[in-house]
Amino acid sequence: MGEFTSFCKRIVSTTIPVQPGKKIQLSSLDLLMENQHLKMVIYYKTPKLGLPIGELTTKFRILLAEVLSYFPTITGRFVKNDEDNWMIKCNDAGVRMVEAIAKGSVESWLENVDEEKEKKLIHWEDWYHIPYYWATFYIMVTEFEEGGMAIGLSCSHLLADPFSATLLVKAWADRVLRGNIFIPPFFHPLPKIKLGLQKAHNQPNEHLINHYKSLIEGPSPSKAHHSKTVALLFTDHMVQACMDLTDLNGLNNGSDPSPFAVLVGLLWVCISRVKGETNGLVDMSMGLDVRKVLELDQGYFGNCMIYTKVNGDDIGGDDQQLATQVIGEAIRKVNKEGIIDLIEWLDHYNNFSPISSLDKGSLVFLNLETVDPYSAVFVEGYEPFKISYYNESAILNKGKVLVLPSHPSEGKLSRLAIVTLPHNEAIELCEDKLLASFSPKIIMGAK
């Protein structure tokens, strides 16, 4: 087993049976994500006082069964409804849990980690051809013989975006540590246009609709070359330097750009350079969590990320300031009215096909700044200190960048950028002079 000395797979079912015959319909935003899946891993540091190997995992498994009673979608299985769309039959089939023991300590594991090694901590089984027997969620708990722990989670993107997946881990941790779930999940439908507004609101916002129409109806991109993932750590000081640079000419109209906007501006320019773009920047698509914009409860469970297209034709190849300004303007255009227009359009679009890729000729940036994995503390002394997220599909053409919060010790503005590009481009990005001028620390995938 290589780095592992023990490996055990189980099924964990809820302690409270679900109502017989219960089914949960998926939203239009869920159904679009059929061809994508999520993976994440949270690393926990070696505690001062070690615990016997296996003790934590057993406790976690017992309490996970209690937590699952709050999450009926993840213990069910996929079936088709009368419209031939996926839905969840809540049959208490449970989640797959893998319990593993690895050699060394968690710190030694991370000394020379890359994407391939990291994904050994995340269990995934592609049984999509027999969906009724396919677990929608997999959880892997790895205890290290010399201290530390890792929790890996993988799931179909049909059921959850990164915020919902993190919500599950946080609920589980709260139950183990404090005995209560502080943010319970909610499974209500996405908002619709109110009846009183329908007459005045007869001209839909076309910006988002046109982008999704091109994603659904456009040709599937060809399969990408071998990709590579690198993780870049930007400290508080580095991000502040980016913010100061973008505001030198007053392009932000007196408002400070967000850490996400300035880092995307920097990486958009740098990645376009390594791709050899000479006429502007490569087009890109931004994925934004819109729970707050839609005034949804923070426990909303499902897909609630919206993708918006940003053209790079009119931006000079080295104009980081203008790139950041354009990003900020694109984010502000994603408003509640436009999102609801998009949802209603998707709801009435007859039998749309799931998106083969969120790429379709664009570089994808996901804003995951508000995910909160570092508060998922299971046991005092076992604190999260490193995270990784992967948003995957079978096709990756231009590339994908996930912007996450880094550990709070790095400062309020600090961010982690997980960048997946064709292999040679990822290597060139790490050597780019503009990127190097901000001194990000390459914490994974440098070689």
Image: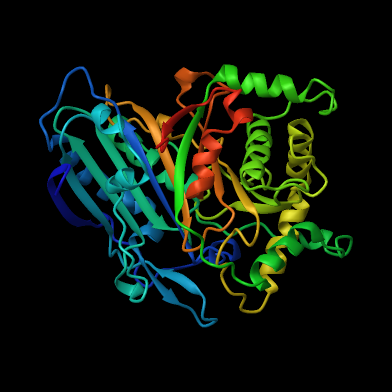
**Front one among 109 and 202:** 109
In this rendering, position of residue 441 left or right of residue 397: left
- At 46% across and 52% down in the image, what residue appears? 227
Q: Is residue 8 left or right of residue 436?
A: left
The image position of residue 244, as x and y in percent, is: 72, 19
Q: Find residue 114 and report its image quarter.
A: top left
Q: Is residue 67 visible?
A: yes
Is residue 132 left or right of 104 when viewed as pictured? right
- Left or right of 51: which side holds 293? right
Q: Position of residue 403 (x, y in %)?
A: 55, 38
Is 239 situated above or below 444?
Answer: above
> Where residue 171 sits in the image (x, y, percent)?
38, 40
In x, y percent, where is residue 301?
Answer: 49, 52
Compared to 176, does 187 lie above or below? below
Residue placed farthest to the right in the image? 200
Q: Nearer the viewer, residue 127 or 378?
A: 127
| Quadrant location of the C terminus in the rendered image | top left
